[in-house]
Image (cartoon, grey):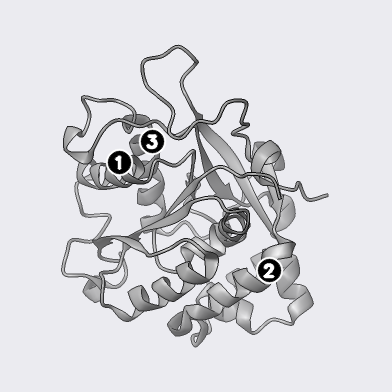
Amino acid sequence: MPHLPSLLAVAAHPDDEVLAFGGVLAQHAAAGARTAVVTATWASGTHRAVELADAVRILGAGEPRLLGYADHRVPDSSTGPRLCDAPLDRVVGDIVRHIRSFQPEIVITHDAYGGLTGHPDHLQTHRAVVLAVGAAGLEHLYPQAGAPCQPAVLYAATHPHSAVADLGPLLTRVNKSVLSVPDQLVDVAVDVRPWLDTKMAAIIAHRSQVERERPLPGILARLPEPERNQIIGTEYFTRIHARPAPGRATRVCCESAGHSHSLMAATSTVAS
């Protein structure tokens, strides 16, 4: 497998990291690339943080990086403020700190809809990550968060209209929204079928969610394998930020000469 660029995933909740981009994380880790996961909600020591640690290790992304905000719908998930109630500037600063510490070439997060279901925490995470990727390379923004470092590209995990025929009815059956985008807005479709065993093992690691019927891990765990693999075998991304033009003062994190930073060219097999 060719060298793949370092990858930092920023997700709202434990289990979002695997549901939205677990295959790409496993793909990068299998190729020897540095990978890491930042999770905005749930505090260290809670049962979902423990499950997250298991899932992240299965994906090869090391130890969890928890921002420690409370889940919008589970106030006791942290003693801190709910993510949506915290000052946006504070959340952005937290994410900038992790970008500068990890120095990823690629950052991935939720799309502007907040994924298929439009969860408020997904929306807030998207907003904060977009701002953080722009700020990370600017030395006078968040100077306390470390030396400036500009990721090469930001991608948002999304779902095209054409890909929700199987999953959509399963979500509407449990009163969840289905917020997909026109197919032409998808820049990359990543075939993650070679890593489905790893991805599914990471989904199962979120035991408290698998045990319930309404969360997506529980829905997926109860499906026949062929139907489940059809749903989770491709991950879709929209490019929403690219590095500044060459010659700018801001350096690019971990840049390799001649290295492509396109997920399509450097990190994916495009699904047919």
Amino acid type, residue under disc 2 in the picture: Leu
Mark 3 vs mark 2, CA separation in Å: 29 Å
The dot on residue 96 is 1
Residue depicted at 79% across the width and 75% down the height: 226
Figure label count: 3
Residue at label 3? 133
Q: Secondary structure at mark 1?
A: helix
Looking at the image, residue 126 lies above or below residue 172 = above
Residue depicted at 64% across the width and 49% down the height: 236
Residue 33 appearing in the image: yes
Mark 2 vs mark 1, CA separation in Å: 31 Å
Side of 247 relative to 3 (left or right) = left
How packed is label 2: few (under 14 Cα within 10 Å), some, or many (20 or more)? some
**Residue 140 appears at what percent x and percent y?**
21, 24
Question: Is 270 or 256 nearer to us in this picture?
Answer: 256
Looking at the image, residue 216 lies above or below residue 157 = below
**Residue 32 appears at what percent x and percent y?**
58, 53
Side of 98 relative to 167 (left or right) = left
The dot on residue 196 is 2
Amino acid type, residue under disc 3 in the picture: Val
Residue depicted at 20% across the width and 34% down the height: 142
Amino acid type, residue under disc 1 in the picture: Val
* Lower sequence index among marks 3 and 2: 3
* Lower sequence index among marks 3 and 1: 1
**Residue 158 appears at what percent x and percent y?**
58, 50
Question: Is 163 or 98 nearer to us in this picture?
Answer: 98
How packed is label 3: few (under 14 Cα within 10 Å), some, or many (20 or more)? many
Q: Residue furthest bottom?
A: 211
